[in-house]
Image: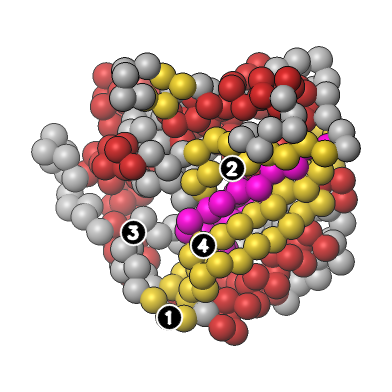
Amino acid sequence: MSKSEQEYLELCEQILQNGIKKEDRTGTGTLSIFGHQMRFDLSEGFPLLTTKRVPFRLIVSELLWFIKGDTNIAYLLRHNNNIWNEWAFKKWVESPAYNGPDMRNFGLRVQQNDQFRQQYEIEMAAFKKRILEDEPFAKTYGDLGHVYGQQWRAWKTSAGETIDQLKDVIEAIKHNPTSRRLIVTAWNPEDIPSMALPPCHTLFQFYVSEGKLSCQLYQRSGDVFLGVPFNIASYALLTHLIAHECGLAVGDFIHTLGDAHIYLNHVEQVKLQLSRTPKTLPTLWLNGDVPSVFAFDVPDIRLENYEPHPAIKAPVAV
């Protein structure tokens, strides 16, 4: 069994066995623990779960969206990536301009009512179509506020200037690799009210040693079944991309979690996943002709030999 995948499965088991039942902002409820750390040796293989299929293309397009500094779901929709739709849709259906059927609290109602689910799917399809075809509408309702891409690439200062944290940290890795300040933060208290979702993965730090680049992420809140597998793969990929540009090998990805939780309506799915035997991790291929993190596009990144167990569906809590 891959040690990398075992780290994740042990987290799931610990939450099921020791998690405290907590209410949460979505009304779904969770089993939760506080404070957990996992370590993934990136030389062992790419840490994408094999006990269920995780859609790597979505991880790639989301990470490139962050790297570009984009905050509008239009880019994601053009890449058939729907993982941020619910937050933009919520902004639309709660706005004074929306005059369709009542979509309030759609997250829970979709799970509880088949008739409502059908109406929700109709409204969501219309919303996505309009985002792609109506630029002024997309600008207003597709934008998620000052979320990750904005903070990574254009942090606003009190002097009215902007800081490109990601570019600066890459330059520091190249020219001052022993620095203990190789940090990017997405947690900007002033901007929290303008964000569709305050950043869950709040701060990451790089570390260079013996020609290898390692990364540690601090994540304040982690949806362990749906979100955390994405986060592991996304920051592993980011580490690979930056190592590629800086001429380094990859070291470890360390994932530190604050509130690590399993939603109560994901418990059976987690148990199913734990019943499966992990397989060999895939390997990552990057287009060696692309010189910079900022020049990569989706076709320049792919997985090889990824043969996981089937996907396990679960509802997103919004």
Q: State the CA–CA distance, disc 3 to disc 1.
A: 20 Å
Taking the spot 63% from the left edge, 72% from the top edge, the residue there is 12
Q: Which residue is mark 2?
A: 204
Report x, y in % for residue 318. 36, 56
Q: Earlier in the sequence, mark 2 or mark 4?
A: 2
State the separation of the CA atoms marked 3 and 4.
24 Å
The amino acid sitting under disc 4 is: Gly
N-term-proximal mark, 3 vs 1: 1
* Amino acid type at mark 1: Lys
- Name which residue lies at 26% across and 42% down: 193
| Residue 198 percent location from the top left of the image | 38, 46
The amino acid type of the residue labelled 3 equals Gly
The structure residue drawn at horizontal position 61% and vertical position 48%, both measured from the top left corner, is 217
Residue 138 x, y percent position in the rendering: 32, 25
Element under disc 1: strand
Amino acid tagged 2: Phe
Q: Gap between marks 2 and 4, in whole Å? A: 14 Å
Q: Quadrant of residue 291?
A: top right
Q: Name the residue tied to disc 1.
A: 21
- Disc 3 is placed on an element classified as helix
Q: Is residue 232 above or below residue 157?
A: below
- The spot of residue 135 in percent (x, y) is 32, 18
Q: Mark 3 Cα within 10 Å, few/some/many (few <14, many 20+)? A: many
As for residue 242 lying within the magenta part, the answer is: no
Q: Nearer the viewer, residue 230 or 276?
A: 230
Kindly indicate the quadrant of the structure image that contains residue 125.
Answer: top left
Tag 3 residue: 107
Label 4 sits on residue: 258
In whole angstroms, how far apart are the C-alphas of marks 1 and 2?
Answer: 29 Å
Q: Which residues are magenta?
A: 212-234
